Each structure stands twice: as structure tokens, then as C-alpha cells.
Amino acid sequence: MKYVTEYRNSRQARAIASELEHAAQPGRQYRFMEFCGGHTHVLARWGLTDLLPGNVRMIHGPGCPVCVLPIGRIDMAMEAALQHKAILCTYADTLRVPASGGKSLFMAKAEGADIRMVYSPMDALAVARDNPQREVVFFAIGFETTTPPTAVCLLQAKKEGIKNFSVICSHVLTPAAMEHILVTAPRREAAPVLDGLVGPAHVSVVIGSEPYRVFADKWKMPVVICGFEPLDMLMTILMLVRQVNEGRHEVENEFTRAVTPEGNLIAKKLMERVFRVRDSFEWRGLGSVPHSALRLSPEFEEFDAERRFGLVERQVPDSKACQCGAILRGEKEPFECKAFGRACTPAHPIGACMVSSEGACAAFYSYGRLRRGSEKSPAA
Amino acid sequence: MKYVTEYRNSRQARAIASELEHAAQPGRQYRFMEFCGGHTHVLARWGLTDLLPGNVRMIHGPGCPVCVLPIGRIDMAMEAALQHKAILCTYADTLRVPASGGKSLFMAKAEGADIRMVYSPMDALAVARDNPQREVVFFAIGFETTTPPTAVCLLQAKKEGIKNFSVICSHVLTPAAMEHILVTAPRREAAPVLDGLVGPAHVSVVIGSEPYRVFADKWKMPVVICGFEPLDMLMTILMLVRQVNEGRHEVENEFTRAVTPEGNLIAKKLMERVFRVRDSFEWRGLGSVPHSALRLSPEFEEFDAERRFGLVERQVPDSKACQCGAILRGEKEPFECKAFGRACTPAHPIGACMVSSEGACAAFYSYGRLRRGSEKSPAA
Amino acid sequence: MAEEKRRYFATPIDVKKGIIDLTHGAGGRATAQLISQVFARAFSNEILEEGHDGAFLPEIHGTPVVSCDAHVIRPLFFPGGDIGSLAVAGTVNDVAMCGAKPLYIAACFVIEEGFPIADLDRIVQSMGRTAREAGVKIVTGDTKVVEKGHGDGLYITTTGIGEVLPGIRVSGRLARPGDRVIISGSMGDHGMAIMSEREGLSFGSGIQSDSAPLNALVEEICRAAPHVHVLRDPTRGGLATTLNEIASQSSVGIMLDEASIPVHEDVAQACEFLGLDPLYVANEGKLIAIVPEEEAESCLKAMRAAPHGEESAIVGTVTAEDPGYVQMTTLMGGVRMVDWLNADQLPRIC
Amino acid sequence: MAEEKRRYFATPIDVKKGIIDLTHGAGGRATAQLISQVFARAFSNEILEEGHDGAFLPEIHGTPVVSCDAHVIRPLFFPGGDIGSLAVAGTVNDVAMCGAKPLYIAACFVIEEGFPIADLDRIVQSMGRTAREAGVKIVTGDTKVVEKGHGDGLYITTTGIGEVLPGIRVSGRLARPGDRVIISGSMGDHGMAIMSEREGLSFGSGIQSDSAPLNALVEEICRAAPHVHVLRDPTRGGLATTLNEIASQSSVGIMLDEASIPVHEDVAQACEFLGLDPLYVANEGKLIAIVPEEEAESCLKAMRAAPHGEESAIVGTVTAEDPGYVQMTTLMGGVRMVDWLNADQLPRIC
Amino acid sequence: MCLAVPGKIVSVSSPEEAVADLGGIRKAVNVSLIDDPKPGDWVIIHVGFALQRIDEEQAQETLRALEAAARSGEALQGAGAAA
Amino acid sequence: MCLAVPGKIVSVSSPEEAVADLGGIRKAVNVSLIDDPKPGDWVIIHVGFALQRIDEEQAQETLRALEAAARSGEALQGAGAAA
Ligand code: SF4
Ligand code: SF4
Ligand SMILES: [Mg+2]
Ligand SMILES: [Mg+2]
Ligand SMILES: [Mg+2]
Ligand SMILES: [Mg+2]
Ligand SMILES: [Mg+2]
Ligand SMILES: [Mg+2]
Ligand SMILES: [Mg+2]
Ligand SMILES: [Mg+2]
Ligand SMILES: [Mg+2]
Ligand SMILES: [Mg+2]
């Protein structure tokens, strides 16, 4: 696999790990937040945590679009399917997230709701075309990576004049969330001290590396944009350690093969046409974050499922036991949650972080619980 | 079973058979037409033909509502289900009748048409109530027995203002068909000479015995209205033999326990309100018969599926091989059809007479083919 | 295994209010949990598959016999039984009709997404009970979940394994002229119990399915009539169709006497009402034994004394004439054919 | 029987253009016709049910083994096989994984009204072919037809019967520290062949299912490694789930080496694309053999020389540490857990 | 033609709706077509409707006629046997 | 987050539609977001859309950087082993 296998070289991995061991200065702590759930998954799936020096600690950020979706928004999707009898098209990722009363879209489907898994927004549009007598709702989630495809899909729906199609627009914005974490950290007692940020790979493909400059400049935070292969990850950590050691705080780009300073201009222009920034948006764990999500622009609001069905987002608190919020803010580790591995497992998740394979709890449960089992994990 | 078992007495059957043997005068032929398929079935199912004297011959008439339904009308029902995607509610009896291209409603169902078996027209109305977003069509077939229930059903539909319900009105009239057979007999070379008529049981429950007077008076034909139990049948034949012997031609009523001279007045009044007599109607075997069927009255024509969907009855000839027409006119016996027991069996019927268990071909195939097998039936 | 797996099942299955979803058929933890908390509990026996791909059985002594049936009945619960008791009894009977002692059952479940776990549990318990009544063990199984709209709640396939009773040799080819046709009781109970419950007919009755395991009855028959020629259970297609099969396979005629065929009053009435013939209606707890004339009386006596055989009756005779055909002297004294069933009997209006 | 019944089938079944309707499952003439013209033709062997309720089998020599599986796959036809070949191979394999020689198959069909008889015929022919390849006989069966909207074209349940090979004793409880874990070839081929064909993903590939009967391979393993401890086919849930089951049953740990696990390039790529892990993807023509260290090399050699074993590889070791857990040294040199499958893997976007 | 069975009305809930007993089976029947339906009435039931009341008197009359014909036939049988 | 894979465009049928090869697998992809897509282009594919072209030059550069870091690490390993 070109552009994949080359970045999974076993020899290089071990060697770079040695280099990293050498670079990390004893007596110093390196605390880096990987914003992105994709990176959380890479660390766990390849067992990279094993290879890191003891004083380099990775802190999981809120960059999993499934994990940050608050219960209220899943309830809206459920309402479209159950009360309004719409065909709900969704990425499989959201199917198992528990919403109000612990009920997931998957369970709603078993109860008879017409919920269909799609791989692309265009598949949802095809469902609408094939079922002209039914309302078809696409549950549009995701960060800037997933947003341009939704935009293209809506453009096409408008062009074809498809009347029975609408979207629950739940697209969120990466820089706003990153900034929110840094802004609110001083107010949060448990907030971790961060020594650097790992910048997302595919989000940055779209938005480019420029938007991160503010973190380096204003917050004096080393940033490295990182690809999703294991060598990308190791290299990025090495680059962050070097910035720390050298007292630099720059935006570096490890993923230059796909990320440019300005990103994808076509995609950005399209997003500007189809969407508008919401004044604020509710994130799981982060609460209400200003200017952190998108709604449809006036030109496309005919496709807004929230308007069409009068869907109103209700604020539903997470399960009391669940520490997802603190975990998404980087304040806690999964095994610090009492439910972890007991009441909450991937088979019976209580919180979103246990659902998505990018969720910190799921990643730790599936790949890592045995390693720290002796200390904390009750399931070991 | 009160009013049933008493009329199935084994001793009496054998004794009345002896009486009949005695009553039938040697050298004389007694040819009686049982108009009604129910009587055809009774003769076969109880093996009564065995018990009749050799010179008493029963000729099967056209009184099976399924058998006389021409292909064109089943095509209309099929069109409602397949082209107009209506839910077609039908008595099970019609499901296996081959229509155009040998295709039955049963096959259309296997292909995906939404065809539902109902036991009563009220069940069809309930389907309409339960599926307000679908068109529901009831395939209303049958003689005067089945007609009043359709009338009650339409009255109810009107009362409730049910908009998605309609009927393909294919109700036919017994006296008109009987008369047609007698009227056309002189023109038909093969027409059997008839010495008497067995009058239908349950049709007469509704219309009474009066309508048959014309056959006795004008056609000088002995008529006995006959119940559907085996002793009713034997007694009726005895009564007919006696009329013939005595040179009488009267309307006698063997089924007085349920048939009165005037029939059911409530039912008759209701039929007058809900239906109008059609100028003419196509019967399988009999061709176009004047004043022989019903359509909806102006008050109820909003429920007319023919109007609602623009269903037009096309005249489709029966399969060439099929002798159903001649059999329904009493001109031929089933085993005189070349297809009988070869290409045409109850499992793979070619004609309607092989479908309905009241059809002469089906009755003979299932109950009698072995007895005459040595002479004619190729399947024996 | 139950022990070892328990720790993974942090949340137990909600047997009261839970519903089946696709994860229960995916072969992962949810499947294991369903097996351990619903199936294993009801079927428990020492052979039952302990997580292996198959079950190891003790030695089989007589000629081994195997039979299978898919059960797709609606409604799933009906007076006198449910799909579970039926799935076990049906296969027990098919094995028994080989003149064999049924020993083991393998059971496969195809469950529709959304099916209530409480119903599944009730059905599985009922299977366990019927298996215990019949003295057979449910030794292995499989569970698949299909998407909503791709099933009808639950389908159960059972395969039975048994061993032929010593000295017995029965076959549909062995009916001989002069043999007597004995049935173990009234005809049509099962089919009419189902029909009377089925949606759309808005028709209620107290008719009970006869569904029952007949292996004990078969053992009694084989003791009393060691030269029994044919054993067969008249299920789909009823007595008429089953006798036609035998007449055809043995190249003999069969002459029935209508007056001697037991049909319960309510079943007869329901048949009249729907225009059905009880001779074509399915039975699930009745058998046909065709035995040499000289063993007929002792066989009848033994059957009447055995479980599920109280209403046994001699209903006909095997003839050399009209081979391949079944005929009947009707109550009225006429003789008529009793033909194969051509298609499912449907309620008719004419 | 075919002979005797032919005369009733005036009109032969239209295998080219006909469709299944409810009469084909009603147990009357149409059912008999379907059996004789479609099933009996493809499966013909001397034991196959001749119209009796069950099949009589020859004597079984080793410990009898029975296993069953319901097959509900969609699409019914896929690159490398179809539901028919799968239903036979799957059950042959489950019997073989008991260290047994599969002998007989019972097959039950649940067909959805409207199903093309041509497709049924093709599937049934494919079952016949696979049975002949595996040297097993399809000895009895059953056919039910369900109403449109209550099935998914066709479900096939198969039950296999076999006899344990002389001297062999395998079980999921018998893995011992030091044993080697051998797999018979690349992981994930079947599941990805299905996934790549499945509607809604608009995703086409040349990936072939590995579906194949493995009984000959098992006989070779048992010859080369007579002390083989565990045999198991990593079907639903894939290698990861099956090894977890074994680790749990045997109370041992298992340590895998990622670099040694064969995964075909196109399967790996398709997994990347859909966000799936090949270790959790189903296989239908692969097995896991856990053998004592001293027999591992000869076993591997024998497997590589046997049919369907060319790509066999030693992929891990059984350990005394971390009993109940499967772990893996990744390509990157890190060690991580390889957990149970929790639910069906679904294509993901994040 | 026109399959119908006798049943006995056991309860009447409205001018349209009643329950009939058919040899132990209970069935809801529509009685719109019957003038003043009452529990105890025997009716002929077709496609869920009571079509007509059964006249017990006439039923007895018919049974007497049947028995008379049968007696006459048996006399002949006896005569035939004796002859 | 945001699972995406590299693929090579093998044919372009319109400014929106193309077919990509993913290690032998063919997949229809929407190329609306790519300026002037051409066969031979490598792109990053996400939810059925090509999100961006891959820069071969930069990819090589990164591989060189990785190898440099690895060499440096191996030198240390060697030193460690020797020590
Ligand atoms: S383990 Fe479960 S309950 Fe606890 S924080 Fe994670 S997702 Fe929430
Ligand atoms: S046997 Fe068949 S083809 Fe011939 S007349 Fe009867 S129904 Fe028609
Ligand atoms: Mg069977
Ligand atoms: Mg059976
Ligand atoms: Mg299984
Ligand atoms: Mg269903
Ligand atoms: Mg049977
Ligand atoms: Mg199995
Ligand atoms: Mg299996
Ligand atoms: Mg069967
Ligand atoms: Mg379907
Ligand atoms: Mg297996």
C-alpha cells in the first residue's frame, strides 16, 4: 500500500524510539495532547505507548466527532426516525452511542426505526432519490474533514431539486475546540499542563496548517501536524520533544505529503457557501463552546432537518458515573472512571468514549487495559 | 353440530338412495343441473354419485363465483396491486386462478404485490383503516350470498368517511345466469337437455324462492331449492325425480329451514341502495350475459376501484385447451377436456374450474377421477 | 465456560424487557452472553457444546437415524404449544417414525432483530421441557440474528439423531395388502389451533394443538407389533397426503372408512366454518402405524394404553387394488378418492 | 420415488424462470416436485431420504460428533462461493475442528416467497459440489417457504455428523503454555469478500472468499501432529475472537506476532479503507491449530503441503502469563491486547 | 357455492355486532342483516355475516320428511332382501 | 479521527466522478474537491470523496527525515549495545 506501508517500517520504529529515548531529557516531563482521536487510536493499536520514554506522556484530546456529540443531538436524530418516521441515514460510527435513557440508534433500529448505515453523504442522497415518498434525513457529523463532502452533497440536492432530503447539521470546528481547551485551562483545577499539541492529519488536509499558528504564537505552544501512520506519530513526538528541548514553539508539519499551509481552497470556499458558523454549540465534555460548529447558510436552509421537523436540542446530562467530559478535556485517564471495565465496556458502553474506536476509553479498554491492569483496571 | 350433523345420517342416506333407486323409472333419463358449485362439491365430497341410479345424471352448472370470473376481471385486480401499488384484499378463493399469461394473484404476491387474504369484507375495511397512507382495494366477488356483506361494508366505509378504500365490484346474479342457460340452449348444439334444476342454498337464503318461479312457469322446469348437506342433496334429487315422474314443474323448497319465499328483506333493500344492475357482464363460459351483475350505485361510486384507477376490463380469451366454458354450460364433462389431469391439475391449473374446490374439474379430479379413470382420465 | 465468561458480562442480559439486536448474532461477547444466560440455562446437560464447534456424543448402538426440520410457524405461541415445543417434538417424532429411539437434538435459531428476549427465553425453556419429556438432549446449537424485515420473529431448525430400535424395520415402501391402517388419535388439532389463532381471521377457539413427542408411543407399538411395516406422522398435508405418499411408495391402495376417523367436534366445526377438510390439516402429535392384520388388535390396544395414544383407531385397510391411490367410504356410503394435497388449504368462501 | 411421483408432475418446474411460491413449502405435490427436480438431483446418494421422515445411516466408528450452523449470509452469491458452498463447508469444518472426519449433512432450507428457482438450483448444485469435494453425503433435508418480507431470499441450516479420528483428542480447553499457534493461511478473505459485495457500500474488488472444506487439511494435521491440542476455525469474530475463546477456556495467555500473520494485500487495503481490523474479520476456509512445540514444525510442513494450507504460518505462542488474554507484538515492536470482538465490525469514518 | 355455517348467537353488543357460538368456537359476527337479533337465535353465517335466521320448526319438518323417505327406502331394502 | 486512505485515480469521467485504485480495489470517488483531477494522481479519500492530492516530493522528503531519525537512533542503539 503506497503512502501507507512505507510509514509502518518496523526497523525504523524501533530506531526512532531509541532516538526519542535519547532526546527526552531525564528530569523533564513532556505532556503532549493529541487532539485527534485518530492519533489516540494509532498510539493504542500499534502499541506505541510501550515505545515512549517514561517521561513522555500523551494526553487524549476531544478530537473524536462521535465522542463530542452530546446526547441531545443524538436524541434529535432518534426523534426524526421514531417520531417523524423519516429514513435516518448515518455513518455507522454513531449507531451505538447511548442517548437518552441509554438508548442508541442501533436499539431504535431493532425497535423498527428505519435507520440506514451509509458510507458517504452521497449514499444518503441516493436513498432520498430512491424513496421519493419518504422523508430522508442525513445525520451529518464530523470535523472539517467530513464537512466538505456534506457541502457537495447539499449542492447536488439543490441542483436536482430533491425535496425529501434534509440534514441534521452537527459539523464541528477543530481550532475553536482547541482554543477553548487552552482558554479554559486556567479556570479548571484538574486541567493538565500541556507542553505541546499534536495537530490532526485529515482535518488539516482541508484547513491547512495556518489556523494552528495562533496556538504557537499566542499560547506559546509547540504544534506538530501529524499523519496517521505509526512512524508519523513517533516522528511527531520526536519533533515535539525537540521543540520543547530547544524552547521553540512553532507550527511544524510532519504530514507535508497532504497538508499545505492553506489547505484545500475549493473545499474551504464550498464550506463558506453552504454553512455559517453557529454562535455557540454544545460539546460533550466541553459544554457550550462559542463559534465551534456549523449550521446551514440561508441558501441551503430548506435542507435543515432541525427546521423541517422542529427538532430542538435538549440538554441532557451524561450518565452520572461517566467521566467522558473530564477525559475529553484531558483531565482524567479512562481507568480513573469507576464504571470503566465494569458497568461500561464496549459491549455495553455508558459513554461515547467507550463507543467510538477513537474514543479514549474504548482504545484503552481494547488495547491497553491489561498493561495497567495491575494498578487500576477492575476488568483485568 | 346442530343443523349439520342431523343431515349427514348414514342410515338415512343409504335408505333414501334405495328410495331413489325405486323412484327412478327404468327406461327414463333424468338430467338435472345443479346450478351451484356447492352442490357439485357435495356430490363429489360425499361420494353421492355412487349412490344415484344409473339413469339419474347430474349436470354441473355455472354456479361457482370463482369459475365464472373471466380472466379480464382478475387482470383488473392484478393491475390495482401491481401497477397502482394498492393493497389488494381478496378472498383466498381467487388467489390461484390463472389470469393473463397464466399468472395468478398468488404469483403476483410472490413477485412482491401486496395481496392480502381476507375472510370478510370488514377485514378489508380494517386494512384500509390501518393503512391510511395506502390505497386498499377489495376484490368483491360472489353471488347474492356475498353481496349483502359488501353492501354493509360500503355503508360503513361511507359512514366513517374512509377515503383510501374501494372495491372492484364483480358481484353476479344467479337468476340471470340460469335464465341465460335456458334461453341460449336452443342455439347451442351441445346444450344438454335438462329435466330439472337444483336451486342454490345460500343464494336463496338471500333472494328467497320466488325468483325461481319463472323457470317453473315459463320454462316448465321442475326446480327444487336444496340445502348443502348430503341428505339435502339426496332428498332434492328424489323430489326432482318425483316431479318428473308426476309431470309437475314447480318450485319446491327442500331448504325451508333457511329459505323463505321472499328471502332476506333487509339484505335485498340494502343491495338496492348500494348497487345497480349492469346492462351486461362478461361471464367465463357464458360470454356476455345481460343484466347479470352489479355495479355501485351513484351514491357509492366514490368507492368504485374501476373509476378510481381507471381499470378497464379487457376481454382475454381462456387458454385454447381449456373447456371450462363448455363445462360451465353443462355441455361437457371434465374428462372430455384434453388437458384434464395432464397439463391441467389442481397443482398447475389451466382453467378456473380446476382451481376452486367447487369447480367441476377440481371436484372430479380430487374426488372422482379414479372411478372413471379406466375410461377417460389419463392421470389414473 | 459460563464461569470464565461471567466476568466479561458486566451488564447481564435483560430477560424481561430486552430485545435482540444484531450484536447478539455477531459471534462476539453479546452472543456468548445470550448463549450462557438463555440457552445453556434451559438446555443444560453434560454433552451440550462447551464452546467447541461441535458436540461429542456417546456411542450409538442401533442403526443411526438423522432427521431435520425447519420450523417457521406463526403465531409463535398457540394453544397447546409454541414454536419451541414444536421444534423439539417435531424432530423427535421424525426420528421415532424411523422405528428409532431419538437421542440428541441440534438446534439452530434465526432471530429477527427486535425480538423480545422474554419471548425467546420462554420458547427456549419450552424446548428444554419438551426435550426432557422426550428424554432427548439438546447437544449443540447456533444463533443468527437477521435484520428487521428479514424474518418473522424466530425460526428454529432442529436436527435429531437416534438409533433404530432392536429388530424393527419400517419404511414407507413396506405397506402390504391386508395391513391395517391405525392412527393414534383425532385429526387436524394442530393445524386448526394455528389457523384459529392466526391474525386476519379474527377467529377464536379453544382448540389445542396436539404437539407432543411420540417416541414413547412408538416404543409401545414396536413392542406390541414387532412386524409393524410403516410409521409416519401426518404433519403438513395431513392424513390424506401422508397416506398418498405411502400408497405411492409401497404401490398399494388404501381404503379408509370415514366413520372410523376421529375428529374432535370443535376441529370439525372450525373446518366447516373455513371450508377446510380435516384430513388435509396438519397434526403434530399423531402417527400412522401400518401393521400386519394379525398384529393390528394388539397394536391398537397397546397404543390406547400409551401416552398420546388414548384415542387410537383402526381407520382403514391396505389393498392390492388401485395401487398408488387412497380412497374412502364416506359416511354416506359412497366411495371417493382422497387425493394429495395440492397446495396449502386456505380458508374459502365458496 | 422420483419415478413414482413423476406422473403427478404433469407440468415440470420451470428452473429457468420460475419463482418459489408458498405452495412449494406446503408439503403437497409442489413440495415433492421441488425436492425431486431440484434437490434430489443435486444431492443424489444412496442414503438420501427416500420420502421417509429421516435417513438411516451406516454404522459410525469413532466417537460421533455433531455440529450445526444457520447460514444467513447476504449477498447469497459472492466471489469465491455462495450460501450453498458456505453452508456445506462451514459445517464440514465445524465437525472437522472436533478432530473428526465429517460424514453426513442434514440441510434445511427457509426460502422467501418469490425467490428465483434458478438461483435455488444454482445454490443447491453448489452444495452438491462442495459435499463431493469434502466427501460427505447430504442425507436428509427440509424445505419451508416463508411469506415475502419474512426472509432474505434463502437461509440454509446445515447439521453435520462425523466420527473422531483415531487417537485424536482436541478441545478448546487443551491449549498449554509453550504450544505454538498455527493458522492455515491469510486472515479476513471471506469477510472482506462479503463486505465488498454488500449493497450500500458501492465498493467493488477482486477479493475472493476463502470458503472451503478443511477436513482433508485436518486429517493431515492429525497425522503430522497427533498430539494437536486445539483445532478451531476462526469464523465470525475472526482470529482475535476465536483465540480469546481458547485463551479463556484453557486459562492460558496467547502472544501473537503481528509480522507473522498473513493478510492478503487487497484484504489489508479494503480493511484500511473501511476502518476494519483483519484480525476480527470472518474466515470460512481457515483453521487455527494449537500444537505442542515439538510437533509444530512438522505440523506446519504438513499443512503447507495439504489442500487449503499452502500459506500456513506459525503466528504465536501459548503462555502461562496473563491467562485469558490474547496479546500481540505489533509490527512497531509495541505490545498490545487483542480483545474479543464486541459487536459486528461496521465500516467507520472515524 | 357460498360456504356458510349455522351458528347460535350468544350475545349481541349492538345492532351490528354479535358473538356466535359454532360448536364451541366463538366468533364475532356482523348481524346488520338480521332483524332484531337475540341471544339464542340460530343463524346462517357467511363471510362473517349472519345472513338469515334458521327456522327450527322447518328444520324439524325437513328431518321428518327425510325420515319418511328413509323409512320408505328401508321398506324397499327389506323387501329386496326378503325377495 | 476522520479515517481516510490514499488512492490513485485511474479514470475521470466528469469533473465530479472518478474511479480510484486502492491496492487492487476499485472504488468510485467524488473528485469535486480536487482541482483538475487526472489519472495517475494520488489522493486522500474520505467518505467517498478525494480530499486532497498527495505530494510525492513531500512524501519522499518525510521518508528521508524518518530514515535520518532512524539512523541516528540506530547509532545510539549500537552505542548502547557496545556500552
Ligand atoms: S469508561 Fe465509560 S462511563 Fe467511564 S468515562 Fe469512559 S465512556 Fe464514560
Ligand atoms: S381440466 Fe383444466 S383446462 Fe380442462 S376444462 Fe377443466 S380447468 Fe379447463
Ligand atoms: Mg424431517
Ligand atoms: Mg417433521
Ligand atoms: Mg455456529
Ligand atoms: Mg417480519
Ligand atoms: Mg414426519
Ligand atoms: Mg456450529
Ligand atoms: Mg461454523
Ligand atoms: Mg420436513
Ligand atoms: Mg426481504
Ligand atoms: Mg467453528
Image: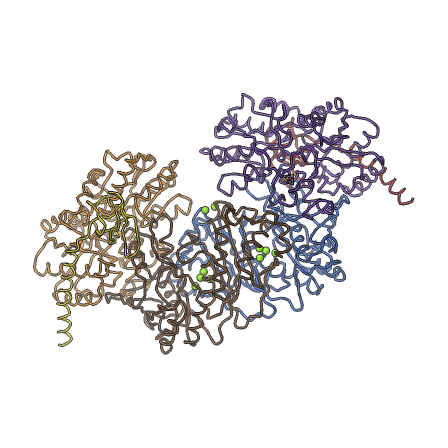
Chain colours: A purple, B orange, C brown, D blue, E yellow, F red
Q: From the image, which quarter does the N terminus of chain D lie in?
A: bottom left
Where is residue B143 drawn, in percent x and y? 23, 47
Quadrant observed for ligand 10 in the rendered image: bottom left
The reply to whether residue D231 is in sight is yes
Where is residue B55 drawn, in percent x and y? 16, 64
**A60 sits to left or right of B183:** right
Give the mark count. Answer: 0
Q: Residue furthest bottom?
A: C294
**Quadrant of the rendered structure where residue F72 is?**
top right
Front residue of F41/A57: it is: A57
Front residue of A164/D220: it is: A164
Q: Is residue D36 above or below residue A73?
A: below
Name which residue lies at 42% across and 58% down. C81
**B179 sits to left or right of A364:** left
Where is residue D115 drawn, in percent x and y? 46, 49
Q: Residue furthest right?
A: F83
The reply to whether residue A270 is in sight is no
Where is residue D74 drawn, in percent x and y? 54, 47
Q: Is residue B175 above or below residue B59?
A: above
Q: Is residue D221 above or below residue F29?
A: below
Q: Residue furthest top?
A: A298
**Quadrant of the rendered structure where residue F75 is?**
top right
Front residue of C119/D192: it is: C119
**C1 sits to left or right of F58:** left
Q: From the image, which quarter does the C terminus of chain D lie in?
A: top right
Q: Is residue A213 above or below residue C258?
A: above
